[in-house]
Every structure is written in C-alpha cells, then in structure tokens.
Image (cartoon, coloured by chain):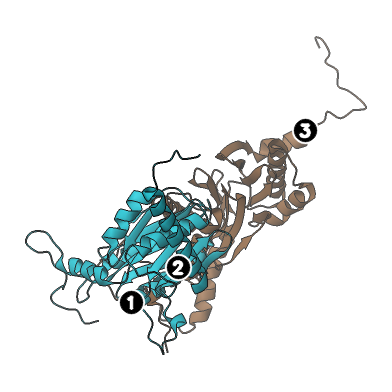
Amino acid sequence: MKLDTSGLESAAPVWGAPSELVDGFSVAPSFEVPNTTDFDGFQKEAIQMVKPAKGTTTLAFIFKEGVMVAADSRASMGGYISSQSVKKIIEINPYMLGTMAGGAADCQFWHRNLGIKCRLHELANKRRISVTGASKLLANILYSYRGMGLSVGTMIAGWDETGPGLYYVDSEGGRLKGMRFSVGSGSPYAYGVLDNGYRYDMSVEEAAELARRAIYHATFRDGASGGVASVYYVGPNGWKKLSGDDVGELHYKYYPVMPSTVEQEMVEVAGA
Amino acid sequence: MARYDRAITVFSPDGHLFQVEYALEAVRKGNAAVGVRGTDNVVLGVEKKSAAKLQDSRSARKIVSLDDHVALACAGLKADARVLINRARIECQSHRLTVEDPVTVEYITRYIAGLQQKYTQSGGVRPFGLSTLIVGFDPYTGVPSLYQTDPSGTFSAWKANATGRNSNSMREFLEKNYKETSGQETVKLAIRALLEVVESGGKTIEVAVMTKEHGLRQLEEAEIDAIVAEIEAEKVAAEAAKKAPATPKET
C-alpha cells in the first residue's frame, strides 16, 4: 500500500501548471539504466571513475569571531595537474559560502542552485534563510540523487541570526553540524595542523594564519592539493576574502632558506 | 486522472467569480468568529451553537492549533475546514523538517490562502467555503499576529477582525472600541465584540488565548461566565454614570 504523500506537497509549484490539482507526488529524477550483464559492477566502476576527483583540501572551522573557510586550488586528473587556479570556495550569497570537493561541475551547479533557492526564500519570507535551512535544502536535493553518481563533499558556512553556522553536506545525503571540518584527499594533513593549533578564542588574524598553515601543510604532503591557499572569513556582516597565497611562496615564508656557515669560503680575487 | 471539460469557477461577463462569491455567502451564514491582537497575546472567540444534550461538546472544538505557536478559527463549512486544517498542520511539520525551523504565522497563512486560491482556478472543484482567522507568535521576533483569509485566497494582517454571521456589526464595534491592550483586557475586548451579536454566556461562546509562553489556552466555561459578568457589570456602571446628574469627575 503506497503512502499517500499528496498532503506533503508545497502549495504552488514554481514550474507546474496551476490546473494540475491532484498531482500525486513529484516523480524522483531518474535516467535510463544501461543494459549490462552486471549492472552493480558497472555502477561501482562508474563511481570509481569519478571518485579520485576529490583530490583537494578544504577546511572550515567556527571560532569566537565567526567562521574561517580555506581551500587549495589544484585540480588533478590522476597524475596530471589540470589546473592550479580553481576557485574552490563558492560564494552562495553575501553571507554564505560553500566549499568544493569532488566533482567540480556538480559542486558549482548545486551551489548555484542553492543560491537561487536561498534568494527565493528571502523574497517569499522577507527574511534571510538560516545556515541550517540552506544546508538542509542542499542535503535533501543531494539525497534525492543518491546513487546516481553525483560527487559532492561540501561545507556550508555562514552567519545567520543564531550566529556562525557550519555544516558538512555530501552526495551520500549525509549532513553534519560541527565546529571543525576538513574535506578532501589532503584533509588528514590539514586536520593534524588544525586540531593542534585550534582554540575557540582566537582573533581573526590568528584564525586566518591557522587556516593558511593547515592548507599549506596539506599541499606540502598531498600531491593532489596545491596551487593557491585561499582564506575567507565569515562574520556578522557577511564573508570577506582575507588572502590568497601561493603555497610555494608560503613554503619559503615558513621555512626560509638560512645561509649556512661554511668552513671555507670562496673569495673573489681581483684581476687574475 | 480524469479531467473535467469545463471548469466550474469561470468568470462572469462583468468580471465576477460567482462561485467564490457564493462561497463568501456560505461564510456569512457560518458562526461568528472574532480575533483581537494584543501587545503580548492574541485572542480568538467563536460563537458556539447550543450543543445538543447528548453531544460531547469537547469533540466539536472550533478553535484549533496548527502548531505550538499558531492557532486557527474559522467561519463557514466545517467539513471544508477539517480538510484545510489537516493540510496546514502537515505543512507546519513539513516546514520544520525541511528548514529545521517553525513556520511564521505569515508563512502558514500564505500557504492556506494559496490552497484556497488553487481551488478557485482548477477544473472540477469548488472553492473552500470558509474564511479563517489565524493567530500566532513569530518564532523569531516573538511578535503576535492576526491574519484573515477568505475563499478567494486573499489574506491580510489585522489588529482585530471578525468573520461569519453578523461580522459587520462586530467589525464596527471593534473599529469604534479598539485600542492597544494586553492580557485580560484583550480577552475582554474580544468577548465584548462577540457579545454584540451572540447571547451572553459561557455556553454560547468559545474563547482561546494564545501567549508566547503558554501557547494556546482554551478558556473554561466558568472563566468565560466570570468575564461576561464583569463586562455586564461595567456596562451597567457606565449606563449609571451617564444617567447620573453631571458631577465633576474625579481623576
């Protein structure tokens, strides 16, 4: 017996014809399944093809002054670095950021879609959507596409009436609320530095430096992360990009080359 | 799904939707309902038809809650009301599920009004024959609100309003006597408006008060009787003061 969910529908679908009164419930998106002898195996293969794309390091954490969000900018295809300048922090709206890990197209499209939904919510309800609400909208959408090959591992960070908010949302449909997250192949390295240096009562500069360091260390050890370490801060007045430093330069900033003492010095001889 | 060839709600040559207007007639025949917004509470009052001796009056409650912080009273076809109320209750919970926040009074009013409008523009259905008075507190700002919807699907916010039988007289009374009140004064104002058109007594009036702290509270018969008695006493005192020889009033 099918559960009658007709009551759960929203009153006015944006695209549907208004004369469609008894609409049952919205059909889940689907595509045609290819004819193979072993579909499960085929599906696993397809997912494996997309999986390595989570070569990245992104992190975000909540502290006293707000939320700090940071990410690298490298895109890799196997051993080939396809780009060193990918924008992995997506600006959903002036007070909410999303990070990109996984399929770049998936992340960009769904974050843009989320931005549209957030704006519509604002217009309809005359108030901004909360970070909780926005992350839930995204999580519900991703859950409805579960098993269809979307690859999204994102963090939604923002500031709303209840203060700073940070949620981790992924394409499996999971959604977690937390104070510190790092996503991507470089995340273990980032966590090491982040968890070690984290204090709730940090100033904005200290937090930015911690985030920058964590990304740098991840890019140092993880081959799939690199490029530019971008750091964004989300405060009561919205987000602000604090810095974007090339990790190569950061390396020499943290570990400058020390002129070492030598036993014998070559001396410049005049003439000869 | 079978489609009807002809929509039942069609425009008349002079731009009226007769089905909607007939629905408004049905509302005018329904029991009187009044809503008054105070600074810290909102009060709903509904005329109760005298219950049959064998009827369990508690099963025929006319003021219902849609969520912890939103309540509704209506005038018109009660069976239509049941359907609308159920859909509204589901929407309140659905909203909590999708955005992890309770609905605002404006949101749920907009939803109910949208639903009522849908039924004026679809094939094979008739409009809902009821107007609703929706009260509640905004979950974020804590501000009390009172909204009214009608069969055409329009809605607006009010400081005080009435619907159903003799709503015009009640509204006139409210326009003359409305002022910003709080607590018990708001309850009294609502009951006074209702008493303009209903015979007095706890048996013929159902009153509920919505406060931020305690949610919806239905007043007991005895409480209503007590307030009615107070109002009667005040009326008598006012008449006496008018008839008394002109003496300088003491402030």
Which residue position is annotated with label 2?
B207
Would you identify the image quadrant in which residue B128 lies? bottom left
The image quarter containing residue A239 is top right
Q: Chain of mark 2?
A: B
Asked if A162 appears above or below A65 in the picture, the reply is: below
From mark 2 to mark 1, how far is it between C-alphas? 18 Å
Which quarter shows the N terminus of chain A? bottom left
Q: Horizontal and vertical percent for residue A154?
A: 57, 57
Mark 3 highlights which residue? Answer: A256
* Chain identity of mark 3: A
Q: CA distance from mark 3 to mark 1?
A: 81 Å
Residue A29 seen in this snapshot? no
Res B123 seen here: yes
From the top left corner, tell me how far across and down residue B180 is, in percent.
45, 48
Q: In the rendered structure, which amino acid carries the disc numbered 3?
A: Pro
In the visual, does B210 lie left or right of B198? right
Residue B164 is left or right of residue B145, and the answer is left
Q: Residues within 10 Å of mark 2 (few under 14, many from 20)?
A: many
Identify the amino acid type marked 2. Answer: Val
Q: Is residue A168 left or right of residue A124?
A: right
The chain letter of the cyan chain reads B
The residue where tag 1 is placed is B78
